[in-house]
Amino acid sequence: MPKPNPFHVCATCIHFRAYKEPGGTRYMCARLGFDTQPSYRFDCWVPKDQVVKLMEKRGWKS
């Protein structure tokens, strides 16, 4: 069984958005249209360019 990809979380996805609001920070998935958290993971994950480069540097496949 392959070990889970440590880069595969919402915060590293191109669809992840963070908004400052009076009550705190709101995290949202622009693709799915609902609130999320940086550490959540979904199968629709598309890593940001800098994450892809870091993954390649560390020997992970995207």
Image: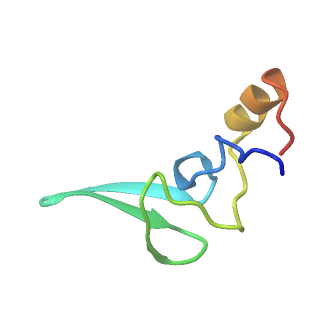
Q: Quadrant of the C terminus?
A: top right
On the image, the x and y values in percent for residue 1 come to 84, 51
On the image, the x and y values in percent for residue 22 come to 12, 59
Residue 18: image quadrant is: bottom left
- At a point 80% along the width and 21% down the height, the residue shown is 57
Residue 5: image quadrant is: top right
On the image, the x and y values in percent for residue 45 come to 69, 60
Residue farthest front in this picture: 1
- At a point 62% along the width and 52% down the height, the residue shown is 13
- At a point 77% along the width and 29% down the height, the residue shown is 53
Q: Nearer the viewer, residue 2 or 50?
A: 2
Residue farthest top in this picture: 57
Left or right for 28, reference 31: left
On the image, the x and y values in percent for residue 56 come to 83, 29
Mark count: 0
Left or right for 22, reference 32: left
Colour scheme shown: rainbow
Q: Is residue 40 above or below residue 34?
A: above
Left or right for 39, reference 42: left
Q: Nearer the viewer, residue 35 or 41?
A: 41
Residue farthest left in this picture: 22
Left or right for 38, reference 47: left
Q: Is residue 23 above or below residue 56?
A: below
